[in-house]
Image (cartoon, helix red, strand yellow):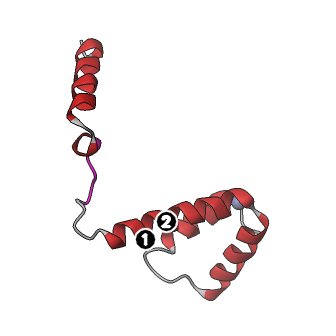
Amino acid sequence: MLSCREASRLVSEGLDHNLPWAQRLSLRLHLMMCRGCSRFRRQIEGLDRFVRRHPDLPERIEPEATLPAEARERIKAAARHTDR
Ligand SMILES: [Zn+2]
């Protein structure tokens, strides 16, 4: 039986390359029994699909680039406040 830590590692690795069948099988068994990990897998897969649908996304999404200017200003002001 896989631990949740192993299962989530396999889920993230499974995006990049195919797992050996034995690992895939035990992962599948774990996901059938573990609600937390199957939710995690759905999130990862959703994220993966999103990135595939938007191939022009920058590799690392800067949170500032996606925020409206007004929110950006608020963050900058808060940073100035704490950055001493
Ligand atoms: Zn689990």
> Residue 46's mark?
2
Residue underneath mark 1: 49
Q: Residue furthest bottom?
A: 21
Horizontal side of residue 37 vs 65, given as left or right: right
Q: CA distance from mark 2 to mark 1?
A: 5 Å
Type of the residue with mark 1: Arg
- Picture coordinates of residue 21, whole percent (x, y): 63, 87
Question: Quadrant of residue 31 in the image?
Answer: bottom right
Classify 82 as above or below 15: above
Q: Secondary structure at mark 1?
A: helix
Ligand 1 neighbours mark 1 (CB distance < 8 Å):
no
Per the image, is 8 magenta? no
Q: Are marks 2 and 1 in contact (CB under 8 Å)?
A: yes
Q: Secondary structure at mark 2?
A: helix
- Picture coordinates of residue 23, whole percent (x, y): 64, 79
- Picture coordinates of residue 8, whole percent (x, y): 60, 62
Horizontal side of residue 66 vs 42, given as left or right: left
The quarter of the rendered structure image containing the C terminus is top left
Classify 45 as above or below 39: below
Per the image, is 62 magenta? yes
The residue located at (27%, 12%) in the rendering is: 81
Crowd around label 1: few <14 · some 14–19 · many ≥20 (10 Å): few
User: What's the magenta region?
Assistant: 59-63
Type of the residue with mark 2: Gly
